[in-house]
Amino acid sequence: MSKVLEIRWHARAGQGAVMAANNLAQVLGELGKYTQAYPEYGAEKRGAPVEAFDRISDSPIRIHSRIEEPQVVLVLDQTLLRTVDVSEGATPDAIFIANSNRQPDELRQKLNIGERRLYVLDGSRIAINEIGVDIPNAPMLGALVKVTNLADINSFNEKFRALMGKKFTSKIIEGNLKAAKRGFEEVKQG
Amino acid sequence: MEKGTLEEKKSKRRVSLTGDDAIAEAMRQINPHVVAAYPITPSTQVVESFARFVADGLVDTEFVATESEHSAMSACVGAAAGGGRVMTVTGSQGLAYMFEVLGVTSGLRLPMVMAIANRALNSPLNIHGDHSDTMAMRDMGWIHLYSENGQEAYDNTIQAFRIAENPNVRTPVLVAIDGFQTSHMVETLTVEPDNLVKRFIGEYIASYPMLDIDNPVLYGAADRPDYYMEHKRSQLVGMINAPEVIQQVGQEYGALTGRYYGLVEEYRMEDAEHAIVVMSATAGSVKDVIDQLREEGVTAGLLKVRAFRPFPAEEVAKSLSRTKSVAVLDRCGTGGAQGGPLFLEVRAALYEEKSPPQVINYIYGLGGRDLPLRHIKDVYLRLREIARTGERGKLVDFLNLRE
Protein backbone atom coordinates (compact mmCIF):
# COMPACT_ATOMS: atom_id res chain seq x y z
CA MET A 1 0.00 0.00 0.00
CA SER A 2 1.26 3.45 -0.83
CA LYS A 3 2.10 6.05 1.78
CA VAL A 4 -0.81 8.30 2.60
CA LEU A 5 -0.57 11.40 4.80
CA GLU A 6 -3.61 11.68 7.08
CA ILE A 7 -4.64 15.04 8.52
CA ARG A 8 -7.30 15.98 11.09
CA TRP A 9 -8.68 19.46 11.66
CA HIS A 10 -10.35 20.49 14.95
CA ALA A 11 -12.38 23.67 14.99
CA ARG A 12 -15.69 25.23 15.85
CA ALA A 13 -18.36 25.49 13.18
CA GLY A 14 -17.92 28.84 11.46
CA GLN A 15 -14.11 28.88 11.58
CA GLY A 16 -13.83 27.47 8.07
CA ALA A 17 -12.18 24.13 8.85
CA VAL A 18 -14.39 22.12 6.48
CA MET A 19 -13.69 24.58 3.71
CA ALA A 20 -9.96 24.60 4.48
CA ALA A 21 -9.80 20.80 4.38
CA ASN A 22 -11.65 20.80 1.04
CA ASN A 23 -9.46 23.59 -0.33
CA LEU A 24 -6.31 21.74 0.68
CA ALA A 25 -7.48 18.63 -1.18
CA GLN A 26 -8.50 20.65 -4.22
CA VAL A 27 -5.31 22.71 -4.43
CA LEU A 28 -2.96 19.76 -3.87
CA GLY A 29 -5.07 17.73 -6.33
CA GLU A 30 -4.43 20.39 -8.94
CA LEU A 31 -0.73 20.32 -8.09
CA GLY A 32 -0.57 16.62 -8.93
CA LYS A 33 -1.32 14.83 -5.66
CA TYR A 34 -4.16 12.39 -5.09
CA THR A 35 -6.35 13.68 -2.31
CA GLN A 36 -9.44 13.14 -0.22
CA ALA A 37 -11.21 15.54 2.12
CA TYR A 38 -14.31 14.98 4.21
CA PRO A 39 -16.09 16.63 7.11
CA GLU A 40 -17.46 15.04 10.24
CA TYR A 41 -20.73 16.78 10.87
CA GLY A 42 -22.14 16.95 14.35
CA ALA A 43 -24.71 19.39 15.68
CA GLU A 44 -24.27 21.70 12.65
CA LYS A 45 -24.60 24.79 14.84
CA ARG A 46 -22.24 27.74 14.74
CA GLY A 47 -19.71 27.32 17.52
CA ALA A 48 -20.18 23.54 17.90
CA PRO A 49 -17.00 21.43 17.70
CA VAL A 50 -16.37 20.10 14.18
CA GLU A 51 -13.74 17.89 12.64
CA ALA A 52 -12.55 17.72 9.06
CA PHE A 53 -10.06 15.37 7.44
CA ASP A 54 -7.63 15.11 4.54
CA ARG A 55 -5.70 12.31 2.90
CA ILE A 56 -2.80 13.23 0.63
CA SER A 57 -0.89 10.73 -1.50
CA ASP A 58 1.26 10.37 -4.60
CA SER A 59 -0.93 7.52 -5.87
CA PRO A 60 -4.71 6.97 -6.06
CA ILE A 61 -6.45 6.63 -2.69
CA ARG A 62 -8.99 3.82 -2.33
CA ILE A 63 -9.71 3.66 1.39
CA HIS A 64 -13.10 5.03 2.51
CA SER A 65 -12.84 4.27 6.20
CA ARG A 66 -12.49 7.15 8.67
CA ILE A 67 -9.13 8.56 9.65
CA GLU A 68 -8.46 7.30 13.18
CA GLU A 69 -4.70 7.80 13.50
CA PRO A 70 -3.78 11.16 11.96
CA GLN A 71 -0.16 12.15 11.39
CA VAL A 72 -1.00 15.84 11.42
CA VAL A 73 -3.50 17.51 13.77
CA LEU A 74 -4.59 21.13 13.42
CA VAL A 75 -6.40 22.98 16.21
CA LEU A 76 -8.13 26.18 15.13
CA ASP A 77 -9.66 27.08 18.48
CA GLN A 78 -7.79 26.75 21.77
CA THR A 79 -10.99 26.80 23.82
CA LEU A 80 -11.75 23.36 22.35
CA LEU A 81 -9.01 21.89 24.51
CA ARG A 82 -11.33 22.00 27.53
CA THR A 83 -13.73 19.50 25.99
CA VAL A 84 -12.05 17.73 23.06
CA ASP A 85 -9.04 15.41 23.27
CA VAL A 86 -7.33 16.58 20.10
CA SER A 87 -4.51 14.05 20.53
CA GLU A 88 -6.86 11.05 20.37
CA GLY A 89 -5.47 8.39 18.06
CA ALA A 90 -2.67 10.61 16.75
CA THR A 91 0.44 8.64 15.78
CA PRO A 92 3.50 8.69 18.08
CA ASP A 93 5.32 10.91 15.59
CA ALA A 94 2.32 13.13 14.84
CA ILE A 95 2.74 16.85 14.24
CA PHE A 96 0.41 19.32 15.98
CA ILE A 97 -0.31 22.79 14.63
CA ALA A 98 -2.29 25.10 16.88
CA ASN A 99 -3.85 28.50 16.42
CA SER A 100 -2.98 30.14 19.72
CA ASN A 101 -1.52 33.19 21.41
CA ARG A 102 -0.32 31.13 24.39
CA GLN A 103 3.24 30.19 25.22
CA PRO A 104 4.21 26.87 23.60
CA ASP A 105 5.02 25.17 26.92
CA GLU A 106 1.64 25.99 28.41
CA LEU A 107 -0.05 24.91 25.20
CA ARG A 108 1.86 21.64 25.03
CA GLN A 109 0.51 20.71 28.43
CA LYS A 110 -3.07 21.59 27.51
CA LEU A 111 -2.81 19.65 24.27
CA ASN A 112 -1.62 16.58 26.16
CA ILE A 113 0.83 15.62 23.42
CA GLY A 114 3.95 14.74 25.40
CA GLU A 115 7.14 15.31 23.44
CA ARG A 116 5.54 15.30 20.00
CA ARG A 117 6.28 18.16 17.61
CA LEU A 118 4.21 21.29 18.15
CA TYR A 119 3.92 24.30 15.88
CA VAL A 120 2.14 27.45 17.00
CA LEU A 121 0.65 30.28 14.99
CA ASP A 122 -1.44 33.24 16.10
CA GLY A 123 -3.75 32.65 13.17
CA SER A 124 -6.66 34.57 14.67
CA ARG A 125 -4.60 37.77 14.85
CA ILE A 126 -3.49 37.30 11.23
CA ALA A 127 -7.07 36.65 10.13
CA ILE A 128 -8.36 39.77 11.92
CA ASN A 129 -5.56 41.86 10.40
CA GLU A 130 -5.90 40.55 6.85
CA ILE A 131 -9.56 39.69 6.38
CA GLY A 132 -11.17 41.57 9.24
CA VAL A 133 -12.76 38.55 10.96
CA ASP A 134 -11.52 35.75 13.18
CA ILE A 135 -11.76 33.00 10.57
CA PRO A 136 -8.27 31.49 10.92
CA ASN A 137 -8.51 28.82 8.20
CA ALA A 138 -6.28 30.51 5.60
CA PRO A 139 -3.33 31.21 7.92
CA MET A 140 -3.58 27.65 9.24
CA LEU A 141 -3.48 26.34 5.66
CA GLY A 142 -0.31 28.37 5.11
CA ALA A 143 1.21 26.97 8.31
CA LEU A 144 0.25 23.42 7.29
CA VAL A 145 1.87 23.82 3.87
CA LYS A 146 5.06 25.06 5.54
CA VAL A 147 5.26 22.40 8.24
CA THR A 148 4.44 19.44 5.97
CA ASN A 149 6.39 20.75 2.99
CA LEU A 150 3.51 19.61 0.75
CA ALA A 151 3.87 22.47 -1.71
CA ASP A 152 5.62 25.71 -2.44
CA ILE A 153 3.52 28.56 -0.98
CA ASN A 154 3.49 30.58 -4.20
CA SER A 155 2.22 27.74 -6.39
CA PHE A 156 -0.20 26.83 -3.59
CA ASN A 157 -1.55 30.38 -3.47
CA GLU A 158 -1.83 30.55 -7.25
CA LYS A 159 -4.22 27.56 -7.27
CA PHE A 160 -5.88 28.77 -4.06
CA ARG A 161 -6.63 32.09 -5.77
CA ALA A 162 -8.27 30.34 -8.75
CA LEU A 163 -10.35 28.20 -6.42
CA MET A 164 -11.61 31.15 -4.36
CA GLY A 165 -12.18 33.17 -7.51
CA LYS A 166 -15.26 31.06 -8.16
CA LYS A 167 -16.96 32.12 -4.94
CA PHE A 168 -15.54 35.32 -3.39
CA THR A 169 -14.86 38.99 -4.06
CA SER A 170 -11.30 40.07 -4.88
CA LYS A 171 -10.94 41.82 -1.50
CA ILE A 172 -11.66 38.60 0.39
CA ILE A 173 -9.43 36.61 -1.97
CA GLU A 174 -6.44 38.93 -1.55
CA GLY A 175 -6.92 38.98 2.23
CA ASN A 176 -7.00 35.19 2.40
CA LEU A 177 -3.94 34.80 0.19
CA LYS A 178 -2.01 37.24 2.34
CA ALA A 179 -3.21 35.44 5.47
CA ALA A 180 -2.08 32.08 4.05
CA LYS A 181 1.32 33.51 3.17
CA ARG A 182 1.72 35.03 6.63
CA GLY A 183 0.72 31.70 8.19
CA PHE A 184 3.45 30.06 6.10
CA GLU A 185 6.02 32.62 7.23
CA GLU A 186 5.06 33.12 10.86
CA VAL A 187 4.39 29.58 12.11
CA LYS A 188 6.95 28.65 14.82
CA GLN A 189 8.06 25.37 16.28
CA GLY A 190 7.22 25.36 20.00
CA MET B 1 -14.74 0.97 -31.28
CA GLU B 2 -14.44 4.74 -31.28
CA LYS B 3 -11.48 6.28 -29.51
CA GLY B 4 -11.08 9.81 -28.18
CA THR B 5 -9.19 12.24 -30.42
CA LEU B 6 -5.72 13.43 -29.42
CA GLU B 7 -7.07 16.88 -28.69
CA GLU B 8 -9.69 15.39 -26.39
CA LYS B 9 -7.08 13.35 -24.58
CA LYS B 10 -5.21 16.57 -23.88
CA SER B 11 -8.28 18.37 -22.61
CA LYS B 12 -9.18 15.82 -19.95
CA ARG B 13 -9.26 17.63 -16.62
CA ARG B 14 -7.96 16.24 -13.34
CA VAL B 15 -10.08 17.79 -10.62
CA SER B 16 -10.84 17.31 -6.95
CA LEU B 17 -14.59 17.37 -6.36
CA THR B 18 -17.12 16.00 -3.91
CA GLY B 19 -19.18 13.07 -5.20
CA ASP B 20 -22.19 15.37 -5.40
CA ASP B 21 -20.29 17.86 -7.53
CA ALA B 22 -18.90 15.07 -9.71
CA ILE B 23 -22.50 14.13 -10.55
CA ALA B 24 -23.46 17.78 -11.09
CA GLU B 25 -20.50 18.16 -13.46
CA ALA B 26 -21.68 15.14 -15.47
CA MET B 27 -25.17 16.68 -15.58
CA ARG B 28 -23.75 19.95 -16.90
CA GLN B 29 -22.07 18.06 -19.73
CA ILE B 30 -25.14 15.93 -20.43
CA ASN B 31 -27.36 19.02 -20.50
CA PRO B 32 -30.69 17.19 -19.96
CA HIS B 33 -33.89 18.73 -21.31
CA VAL B 34 -35.58 18.62 -17.92
CA VAL B 35 -34.37 18.24 -14.33
CA ALA B 36 -37.07 18.21 -11.66
CA ALA B 37 -35.86 17.85 -8.09
CA TYR B 38 -36.51 18.54 -4.44
CA PRO B 39 -33.16 18.73 -2.62
CA ILE B 40 -32.48 16.40 0.31
CA THR B 41 -29.32 15.71 2.32
CA PRO B 42 -26.84 14.25 1.34
CA SER B 43 -27.50 14.95 -2.36
CA THR B 44 -28.48 18.60 -1.86
CA GLN B 45 -25.23 19.83 -3.35
CA VAL B 46 -25.99 18.14 -6.69
CA VAL B 47 -29.18 20.17 -6.99
CA GLU B 48 -27.51 23.38 -5.72
CA SER B 49 -24.61 23.14 -8.13
CA PHE B 50 -26.85 22.24 -11.03
CA ALA B 51 -29.23 25.13 -10.21
CA ARG B 52 -26.18 27.42 -10.44
CA PHE B 53 -25.32 26.00 -13.88
CA VAL B 54 -28.88 26.79 -14.95
CA ALA B 55 -28.71 30.33 -13.52
CA ASP B 56 -25.34 30.92 -15.19
CA GLY B 57 -26.69 29.78 -18.55
CA LEU B 58 -24.24 26.86 -18.80
CA VAL B 59 -27.06 24.43 -19.63
CA ASP B 60 -30.34 24.72 -21.56
CA THR B 61 -32.19 22.57 -19.04
CA GLU B 62 -35.69 23.36 -17.88
CA PHE B 63 -35.10 23.13 -14.14
CA VAL B 64 -38.22 22.49 -12.10
CA ALA B 65 -37.89 23.09 -8.35
CA THR B 66 -40.84 21.06 -7.13
CA GLU B 67 -42.56 21.17 -3.75
CA SER B 68 -41.86 17.51 -2.94
CA GLU B 69 -40.12 14.40 -4.22
CA HIS B 70 -43.44 12.88 -5.20
CA SER B 71 -43.98 15.89 -7.47
CA ALA B 72 -40.38 15.76 -8.70
CA MET B 73 -40.76 12.18 -9.94
CA SER B 74 -44.22 12.97 -11.34
CA ALA B 75 -42.79 15.93 -13.28
CA CYS B 76 -40.03 13.65 -14.58
CA VAL B 77 -42.61 11.11 -15.74
CA GLY B 78 -44.47 13.80 -17.66
CA ALA B 79 -41.31 15.22 -19.19
CA ALA B 80 -39.99 11.80 -20.19
CA ALA B 81 -43.33 10.74 -21.67
CA GLY B 82 -43.31 14.02 -23.56
CA GLY B 83 -40.04 12.96 -25.17
CA GLY B 84 -37.41 14.70 -23.05
CA ARG B 85 -34.07 13.56 -21.67
CA VAL B 86 -34.79 13.73 -17.96
CA MET B 87 -32.98 13.45 -14.65
CA THR B 88 -33.62 13.83 -10.93
CA VAL B 89 -31.69 13.47 -7.70
CA THR B 90 -32.76 12.25 -4.25
CA GLY B 91 -32.28 9.68 -1.47
CA SER B 92 -33.66 8.32 1.79
CA GLN B 93 -37.03 9.81 2.83
CA GLY B 94 -37.16 11.62 -0.50
CA LEU B 95 -36.89 8.36 -2.39
CA ALA B 96 -39.46 6.79 -0.07
CA TYR B 97 -41.81 9.67 -0.81
CA MET B 98 -41.39 9.02 -4.56
CA PHE B 99 -42.20 5.37 -4.16
CA GLU B 100 -45.58 5.06 -5.87
CA VAL B 101 -44.34 6.95 -8.93
CA LEU B 102 -41.19 4.82 -9.29
CA GLY B 103 -43.22 1.90 -10.60
CA VAL B 104 -45.04 4.20 -13.00
CA THR B 105 -41.71 5.28 -14.51
CA SER B 106 -40.49 1.75 -15.10
CA GLY B 107 -43.97 0.48 -16.01
CA LEU B 108 -44.26 3.09 -18.75
CA ARG B 109 -40.74 2.15 -19.92
CA LEU B 110 -39.56 5.74 -19.58
CA PRO B 111 -35.81 6.21 -19.95
CA MET B 112 -34.68 8.43 -17.09
CA VAL B 113 -31.70 8.76 -14.77
CA MET B 114 -31.91 9.31 -11.03
CA ALA B 115 -28.83 10.01 -8.91
CA ILE B 116 -29.09 8.83 -5.33
CA ALA B 117 -26.87 9.65 -2.39
CA ASN B 118 -27.71 6.58 -0.31
CA ARG B 119 -28.93 7.48 3.17
CA ALA B 120 -30.54 5.64 6.06
CA LEU B 121 -34.30 5.61 6.45
CA ASN B 122 -36.14 6.84 9.56
CA SER B 123 -36.54 5.89 12.37
CA PRO B 124 -34.37 6.93 14.17
CA LEU B 125 -33.78 10.00 12.03
CA ASN B 126 -30.33 9.77 10.50
CA ILE B 127 -28.85 11.70 7.58
CA HIS B 128 -25.85 9.41 7.02
CA GLY B 129 -25.15 6.68 4.56
CA ASP B 130 -26.55 3.20 4.18
CA HIS B 131 -28.39 1.33 1.42
CA SER B 132 -31.81 0.93 3.07
CA ASP B 133 -33.39 3.45 0.70
CA THR B 134 -32.48 1.92 -2.67
CA MET B 135 -32.73 -1.65 -1.38
CA ALA B 136 -36.35 -0.91 -0.44
CA MET B 137 -37.01 -0.15 -4.14
CA ARG B 138 -35.01 -3.01 -5.56
CA ASP B 139 -38.01 -4.59 -7.25
CA MET B 140 -39.53 -1.41 -8.71
CA GLY B 141 -38.23 -2.20 -12.20
CA TRP B 142 -35.31 0.23 -12.16
CA ILE B 143 -31.75 -0.60 -13.16
CA HIS B 144 -29.37 -0.02 -10.21
CA LEU B 145 -25.73 1.04 -10.65
CA TYR B 146 -23.58 1.52 -7.52
CA SER B 147 -20.46 3.71 -7.47
CA GLU B 148 -17.28 3.22 -5.44
CA ASN B 149 -16.06 6.84 -5.56
CA GLY B 150 -16.47 10.22 -7.24
CA GLN B 151 -14.92 8.98 -10.47
CA GLU B 152 -17.43 6.17 -10.78
CA ALA B 153 -20.27 8.51 -9.80
CA TYR B 154 -19.31 10.74 -12.73
CA ASP B 155 -18.75 7.86 -15.15
CA ASN B 156 -21.92 6.00 -14.15
CA THR B 157 -24.09 9.11 -14.54
CA ILE B 158 -22.91 9.52 -18.14
CA GLN B 159 -23.25 5.83 -19.02
CA ALA B 160 -26.68 5.63 -17.36
CA PHE B 161 -28.27 7.74 -20.11
CA ARG B 162 -26.94 5.46 -22.83
CA ILE B 163 -28.25 2.42 -20.97
CA ALA B 164 -31.68 3.89 -20.14
CA GLU B 165 -32.23 5.25 -23.65
CA ASN B 166 -31.10 2.15 -25.55
CA PRO B 167 -34.17 1.10 -27.60
CA ASN B 168 -33.82 -2.46 -26.32
CA VAL B 169 -33.78 -1.30 -22.71
CA ARG B 170 -35.92 1.85 -22.31
CA THR B 171 -35.88 1.44 -18.56
CA PRO B 172 -35.03 4.02 -15.87
CA VAL B 173 -31.59 3.81 -14.25
CA LEU B 174 -30.53 4.89 -10.79
CA VAL B 175 -26.91 5.77 -10.02
CA ALA B 176 -26.09 5.43 -6.34
CA ILE B 177 -23.25 6.83 -4.27
CA ASP B 178 -22.72 6.40 -0.54
CA GLY B 179 -24.14 9.35 1.39
CA PHE B 180 -21.42 11.54 2.97
CA GLN B 181 -18.72 8.91 2.39
CA THR B 182 -18.81 9.77 -1.32
CA SER B 183 -21.36 12.58 -1.63
CA HIS B 184 -19.43 14.91 0.72
CA MET B 185 -15.91 13.59 0.15
CA VAL B 186 -13.58 15.54 -2.09
CA GLU B 187 -11.72 13.05 -4.28
CA THR B 188 -9.41 13.37 -7.26
CA LEU B 189 -11.01 12.37 -10.55
CA THR B 190 -10.76 12.84 -14.28
CA VAL B 191 -13.42 14.86 -16.05
CA GLU B 192 -13.72 14.23 -19.79
CA PRO B 193 -14.03 17.05 -22.32
CA ASP B 194 -17.57 18.37 -22.87
CA ASN B 195 -17.46 17.38 -26.56
CA LEU B 196 -16.54 13.81 -25.82
CA VAL B 197 -19.41 13.40 -23.36
CA LYS B 198 -21.81 15.07 -25.75
CA ARG B 199 -20.77 12.75 -28.57
CA PHE B 200 -20.87 9.68 -26.33
CA ILE B 201 -24.43 10.20 -25.13
CA GLY B 202 -25.58 11.49 -28.53
CA GLU B 203 -28.80 13.26 -29.32
CA TYR B 204 -31.83 11.73 -27.68
CA ILE B 205 -34.66 10.74 -29.93
CA ALA B 206 -37.59 9.51 -27.87
CA SER B 207 -39.36 6.42 -29.19
CA TYR B 208 -42.99 7.37 -28.61
CA PRO B 209 -43.12 10.99 -27.44
CA MET B 210 -46.53 12.27 -26.35
CA LEU B 211 -45.67 15.64 -27.81
CA ASP B 212 -45.50 14.15 -31.31
CA ILE B 213 -49.07 15.18 -32.10
CA ASP B 214 -48.99 13.65 -35.56
CA ASN B 215 -48.57 10.24 -34.00
CA PRO B 216 -50.81 10.17 -30.94
CA VAL B 217 -49.99 7.66 -28.22
CA LEU B 218 -51.56 6.69 -24.93
CA TYR B 219 -49.58 6.55 -21.67
CA GLY B 220 -50.84 5.36 -18.32
CA ALA B 221 -53.87 3.35 -19.38
CA ALA B 222 -55.83 1.07 -17.07
CA ASP B 223 -55.51 -2.67 -17.64
CA ARG B 224 -57.92 -5.40 -16.64
CA PRO B 225 -57.00 -8.96 -15.68
CA ASP B 226 -57.31 -10.01 -19.33
CA TYR B 227 -54.12 -8.19 -20.41
CA TYR B 228 -52.36 -6.80 -17.30
CA MET B 229 -50.15 -9.85 -17.02
CA GLU B 230 -49.04 -9.76 -20.66
CA HIS B 231 -48.14 -6.11 -20.27
CA LYS B 232 -46.17 -6.73 -17.07
CA ARG B 233 -44.30 -9.51 -18.86
CA SER B 234 -43.46 -7.22 -21.75
CA GLN B 235 -42.11 -4.60 -19.32
CA LEU B 236 -39.47 -7.10 -18.24
CA VAL B 237 -37.92 -7.18 -21.71
CA GLY B 238 -35.90 -4.04 -21.00
CA MET B 239 -34.45 -5.58 -17.85
CA ILE B 240 -33.70 -8.83 -19.67
CA ASN B 241 -31.81 -6.93 -22.39
CA ALA B 242 -30.03 -4.63 -19.94
CA PRO B 243 -26.96 -6.76 -18.97
CA GLU B 244 -25.69 -6.89 -22.53
CA VAL B 245 -26.25 -3.16 -23.02
CA ILE B 246 -24.64 -2.22 -19.67
CA GLN B 247 -21.52 -4.16 -20.68
CA GLN B 248 -21.48 -2.82 -24.23
CA VAL B 249 -21.81 0.77 -23.02
CA GLY B 250 -19.10 0.13 -20.39
CA GLN B 251 -16.74 -1.13 -23.11
CA GLU B 252 -17.48 1.76 -25.41
CA TYR B 253 -16.96 4.24 -22.58
CA GLY B 254 -13.69 2.50 -21.71
CA ALA B 255 -12.40 2.76 -25.28
CA LEU B 256 -13.01 6.52 -25.14
CA THR B 257 -11.79 7.25 -21.62
CA GLY B 258 -9.57 4.36 -20.56
CA ARG B 259 -12.00 3.45 -17.77
CA TYR B 260 -13.89 0.25 -18.57
CA TYR B 261 -17.01 -0.92 -16.77
CA GLY B 262 -18.89 -4.21 -16.49
CA LEU B 263 -21.64 -5.67 -14.33
CA VAL B 264 -19.16 -6.55 -11.62
CA GLU B 265 -15.53 -5.71 -10.87
CA GLU B 266 -13.08 -8.34 -9.67
CA TYR B 267 -10.04 -7.47 -7.60
CA ARG B 268 -7.34 -10.13 -7.18
CA MET B 269 -9.91 -12.88 -7.74
CA GLU B 270 -7.76 -14.99 -10.13
CA ASP B 271 -6.51 -17.22 -7.30
CA ALA B 272 -8.61 -15.95 -4.39
CA GLU B 273 -9.81 -18.60 -1.90
CA HIS B 274 -11.61 -16.10 0.34
CA ALA B 275 -13.76 -13.36 -1.14
CA ILE B 276 -15.77 -10.40 0.07
CA VAL B 277 -18.76 -9.26 -1.99
CA VAL B 278 -19.72 -5.63 -1.45
CA MET B 279 -21.02 -2.54 -3.26
CA SER B 280 -20.02 1.13 -3.33
CA ALA B 281 -17.44 3.03 -1.24
CA THR B 282 -16.46 0.17 1.07
CA ALA B 283 -15.03 -1.73 -1.92
CA GLY B 284 -12.11 0.73 -1.90
CA SER B 285 -11.28 -0.04 1.73
CA VAL B 286 -11.54 -3.78 1.01
CA LYS B 287 -8.98 -3.45 -1.81
CA ASP B 288 -6.47 -1.89 0.60
CA VAL B 289 -7.00 -4.73 3.09
CA ILE B 290 -6.55 -7.33 0.34
CA ASP B 291 -3.15 -5.89 -0.60
CA GLN B 292 -2.06 -6.06 3.06
CA LEU B 293 -3.31 -9.61 3.51
CA ARG B 294 -1.77 -10.86 0.28
CA GLU B 295 1.62 -9.85 1.70
CA GLU B 296 0.80 -12.00 4.73
CA GLY B 297 -0.07 -14.95 2.48
CA VAL B 298 -3.88 -14.76 2.76
CA THR B 299 -5.45 -15.40 -0.66
CA ALA B 300 -8.06 -12.68 -0.39
CA GLY B 301 -10.15 -11.22 -3.21
CA LEU B 302 -13.03 -8.83 -3.86
CA LEU B 303 -16.09 -9.10 -6.04
CA LYS B 304 -17.67 -5.67 -6.32
CA VAL B 305 -21.23 -5.62 -7.63
CA ARG B 306 -21.84 -2.57 -9.82
CA ALA B 307 -25.18 -3.57 -11.34
CA PHE B 308 -27.45 -4.81 -8.56
CA ARG B 309 -30.48 -4.77 -10.90
CA PRO B 310 -30.48 -6.64 -13.16
CA PHE B 311 -28.53 -8.91 -10.82
CA PRO B 312 -25.54 -10.47 -12.60
CA ALA B 313 -26.07 -13.98 -11.21
CA GLU B 314 -23.96 -15.77 -13.83
CA GLU B 315 -20.97 -13.47 -13.40
CA VAL B 316 -21.21 -13.73 -9.62
CA ALA B 317 -21.42 -17.52 -9.69
CA LYS B 318 -18.52 -17.80 -12.12
CA SER B 319 -16.32 -15.50 -10.07
CA LEU B 320 -17.09 -17.08 -6.69
CA SER B 321 -17.24 -20.74 -7.77
CA ARG B 322 -13.46 -21.03 -7.47
CA THR B 323 -13.37 -19.74 -3.88
CA LYS B 324 -13.70 -21.66 -0.62
CA SER B 325 -15.43 -19.08 1.55
CA VAL B 326 -17.31 -15.87 0.87
CA ALA B 327 -18.61 -13.02 3.04
CA VAL B 328 -21.31 -10.79 1.62
CA LEU B 329 -21.41 -7.34 3.20
CA ASP B 330 -24.85 -5.72 3.20
CA ARG B 331 -25.31 -2.07 4.10
CA CYS B 332 -28.90 -2.46 5.25
CA GLY B 333 -30.84 -4.62 7.66
CA THR B 334 -32.50 -7.93 6.91
CA GLY B 335 -36.10 -7.04 7.76
CA GLY B 336 -36.90 -10.63 8.66
CA ALA B 337 -35.33 -12.14 5.56
CA GLN B 338 -32.66 -14.84 5.75
CA GLY B 339 -30.02 -12.13 5.37
CA GLY B 340 -29.33 -8.84 3.60
CA PRO B 341 -30.54 -8.38 0.00
CA LEU B 342 -27.11 -8.72 -1.58
CA PHE B 343 -26.48 -11.90 0.43
CA LEU B 344 -29.76 -13.45 -0.72
CA GLU B 345 -28.88 -12.81 -4.35
CA VAL B 346 -25.33 -14.09 -4.04
CA ARG B 347 -26.33 -17.26 -2.20
CA ALA B 348 -29.10 -17.99 -4.70
CA ALA B 349 -26.67 -17.42 -7.58
CA LEU B 350 -24.42 -20.16 -6.17
CA TYR B 351 -27.18 -22.74 -5.69
CA GLU B 352 -26.45 -24.69 -8.85
CA GLU B 353 -22.69 -24.84 -8.37
CA LYS B 354 -21.36 -28.38 -7.83
CA SER B 355 -19.17 -27.41 -4.88
CA PRO B 356 -20.17 -23.94 -3.81
CA PRO B 357 -18.15 -21.98 -1.26
CA GLN B 358 -19.45 -21.42 2.26
CA VAL B 359 -21.25 -18.07 2.29
CA ILE B 360 -21.79 -15.84 5.31
CA ASN B 361 -23.42 -12.44 5.67
CA TYR B 362 -22.43 -9.31 7.56
CA ILE B 363 -24.53 -6.20 8.07
CA TYR B 364 -22.30 -3.12 8.25
CA GLY B 365 -22.28 0.67 8.08
CA LEU B 366 -25.88 1.39 9.10
CA GLY B 367 -26.62 5.09 9.49
CA GLY B 368 -23.06 6.03 8.55
CA ARG B 369 -21.25 3.67 10.99
CA ASP B 370 -17.61 3.52 9.96
CA LEU B 371 -15.97 0.29 8.86
CA PRO B 372 -12.31 0.43 9.90
CA LEU B 373 -9.85 -1.76 7.99
CA ARG B 374 -9.25 -4.02 11.01
CA HIS B 375 -12.87 -5.22 10.86
CA ILE B 376 -12.53 -6.06 7.16
CA LYS B 377 -9.33 -7.93 7.98
CA ASP B 378 -11.17 -9.89 10.69
CA VAL B 379 -13.75 -10.95 8.11
CA TYR B 380 -11.04 -12.43 5.88
CA LEU B 381 -9.42 -14.19 8.83
CA ARG B 382 -12.77 -15.73 9.74
CA LEU B 383 -13.24 -16.80 6.10
CA ARG B 384 -9.85 -18.51 6.18
CA GLU B 385 -10.85 -20.28 9.40
CA ILE B 386 -14.16 -21.40 7.86
CA ALA B 387 -12.29 -22.83 4.88
CA ARG B 388 -9.78 -24.58 7.16
CA THR B 389 -12.28 -26.15 9.57
CA GLY B 390 -15.36 -26.43 7.38
CA GLU B 391 -17.37 -24.95 10.27
CA ARG B 392 -19.43 -22.05 9.04
CA GLY B 393 -20.73 -20.73 12.36
CA LYS B 394 -23.17 -17.85 12.48
CA LEU B 395 -24.83 -17.18 9.11
CA VAL B 396 -25.69 -13.50 9.59
CA ASP B 397 -23.77 -11.18 11.87
CA PHE B 398 -23.01 -7.49 12.35
CA LEU B 399 -19.70 -5.69 11.84
CA ASN B 400 -18.45 -3.00 14.23
CA LEU B 401 -21.52 -3.19 16.44
CA ARG B 402 -21.60 -2.61 20.21
CA GLU B 403 -23.20 -5.64 21.82
Image (cartoon, helix red, strand yellow):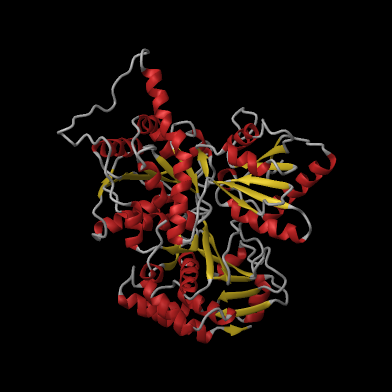
Q: Point out residue B218 in the picture as x, y percentages from the top left corner.
A: 24, 26
Q: Point out residue B315 in the picture as x, y percentages from the top left corner.
A: 59, 41
Q: In this view, does B244 lie to the left or right of B76?
A: right
Q: Residue A64 appears in which quarter of the rendering? A: bottom right
Query: Which of the two residues, B76 or B266, is positioned nearer the viewer here?
Result: B266
Q: Residue B348 appears in which quarter of the rendering? A: top right
Q: Is residue A63 above or below residue B325?
A: below
Q: Residue furthest top?
A: B226
Q: Is residue B128 above or below residue B186?
A: above
Q: Point out residue B33 in the picture as x, y percentages from the top left corner.
A: 26, 48
Is residue B45 visible in the rendered image? The answer is: yes
Q: Residue furthest bottom?
A: A185
Q: Point out residue B273 in the picture as x, y percentages from the top left corner.
A: 74, 47
Q: Is residue B229 left or right of residue B211?
A: right
Query: Which of the two residues, B147 or B73, is positioned nearer the viewer here?
Result: B147
Q: Which residue lies furthest to the right in this view?
A: B389
